[in-house]
Every structure is written in structure tokens, then in C-alpha cells.
Image: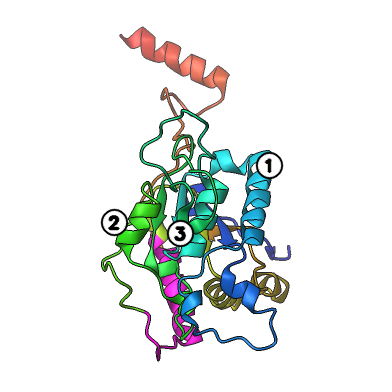
Amino acid sequence: MAEASAVAALYPAHRCKTVYLVRHAQGLHNAEEEKDVVDYTLPALLDAQLTPLGWSQVDCLREHVTKCGLAKKIELVIVSPLMRTLQTAVGVFGGGSCTDGESTSPLLMVEGAENSGRQPISSLNCPPFLALEACREQLSVLTSDKRSSITRYRTLFPAIDFSLIENDEDVLWGPDVIEPNESVAARGMNFFDWLWTREEKEIAIVSHCGFLYHTLNMYGKECHPTVAEELGKSFANCELRSMVLVDRSNLGSDTSTYNFAGKIPTGLDMPSDVADKKQAEEASKN
């Protein structure tokens, strides 16, 4: 008999997570790209926020994740600590705009944050939000990639958890710092490994084009060319892609929620008629 050659890969469900990767909506710096000559070092582009078009993209993605049921599945939202990603994350996955007279404390986003003209966003009926430097954009000389202080973010986004960010000011960005592509990919893979320290199985990650592109292309090197090509495509603004993250090195420590050990109650593993006879014999001895 010829040996079987499996094309599909099979992994225990408790060694898998589903991650929903989202690139931020259009930021001011993205809108500048449409001009013939752009100076990306302009102070006006510092920690670029969303444009009105970007907010419209957020509204469209929010409608999609609500209609398809994804919004109810997500257990955690991890977000890069830059203005455009924070705005995208709360706009898409937050509890929605607060109605008149509704009191929610703390809010995911205060009213009119960054002169956005948006209503306050509630933290009710939505997953927790966690900000991490590990999934921020590739470091470069662009002022749009320099973040604001965590103190400022906490004022604008009170319900987001910034506790895992060590420094209030941005100590990673510099006017002459350019992060190599390989370093971005390594940082991204370390980030995905870190996800196995979390118990959540359905996680949304709101990040950036460069970070996602270099990280996914590194993973694609181990895949079939067709899959690698799919992984390696650049993300459009406010694009969402779902991926399955597999623990191949026993990084996770959780056990399956749905597995059942069997033999409960215990009994004789033999045909029922034989088992009945055996049990009758045992009973006669007592």
C-alpha cells in the first residue's frame, strides 16, 4: 500500500488561536501620499490621526464586523500605541457612541478626541483593549511614526490599558533611526509568540502596513507559494484579514475546553454481551 501524503495540516484546537489583523484607516500622512512632493518629516504629521475619509472607513468596517457576527466573537483587542491605530481600534471594536444621558466610565474615547468631531465611544459591551509597543509601525524618520505620550493617550482613551508600555514618552523613535526590515519581522514573530501567554482565543490586532507586511512575509517563507503570496500582500487602509495562529513548539500551556477524556463512568472495554456475562460473574462472587 502506498504511503499517504497529507496536504492539509492537523493541529489540536487548543493549540490554535484566530487573529484578526487590521491595518489602521486612512491617516493624514496617507492622504499626503497623493501629492507629488511630500515631506514626511513635517511636524504637522507627528503621530498622524485619521482623516474624515479614515473615519468613514472605520464606520464601514464596524458595520461589517457587526453584521457578520465577528464583533461578538472577539475576546481581546491589541492595538499599536499610535493615534491612528487607537482611533481605528475603538471606532471598529468599541462599544459604540454613547447615547444622550448615558453614563459610561471610563470611556474608550472621549468626545471629539484630536478634533475628530466624533461622539464619545463607550467601553460597554465590547472586549478589553490592550496597547503594545511590539506591534507598532516600523521605526523610521517619518514624524507620523512617532507616538505621543502615554499620559496624553490616557486622557483621550481612558479605557484602553497602557500598563505594558514602560515609558511615557516615545524613546524608540528618533530622527535618524531606521528599523531594518528583518528586525521588524523578528519583532513581529516575537509578538505572535507572546500571544501564547494570553488565554484569549479570538484576538483582534490593529496595527500598520509595514509591520504586518514584513511579519507575514517572514511567515510565508515556510508556506506553499500560493499561501505565501496571499500572506505577503500589502494591507489597504482599514483592511481586515483573519488568520489561524498555530502553536508548534508547546508555547501555550492551556488545555482544551471541549476535549473529553472518555471512560466516564469506567467499565469493561469489551462487547456488551461479554461485559454483561463478566459483570454477572463478578457479582456472583460477592
Q: Name the amino acid type tagged 1.
A: Cys
Q: Which residue is mark 3?
A: 79
- Mark 1 neighbour density, 10 Å: few (under 14) some (14–19) many (20 or more): few
Q: Amino acid at mark 2?
A: Ser
Please give the name of the residue rendered at 54% of the width and 84% of the height, measured from the top-left corner: 40
Choose between 13 and 164: the one closer to the eye: 164
Q: Quadrant of residue 164?
A: bottom left
Quarter containing the C terminus: top left
Give the alpha-carbon distance from disc 3 to disc 1, as whole Å. Answer: 22 Å
Residue 132 percent across, percent down from the top left = 38, 63
Nearer the observer, disc 1 or disc 2? 2
Q: Is residue 252 visible in the rendered structure shown here? A: no
User: What is the span of residues highlighted in magenta in the rendered image?
Assistant: 173-194
Mark 2 secondary-structure assignment: loop
Decide: few, some or many residues near mark 2? Use Cα within 10 Å; few <14, some 14-19, many ≥20.
few
- Picture layout, residue 127 above or below residue 135: above
Element type at mark 3? strand
- In three-dimensional space, the C-alpha distance between marks 2 and 3, rounded to whole angstroms, equals 13 Å
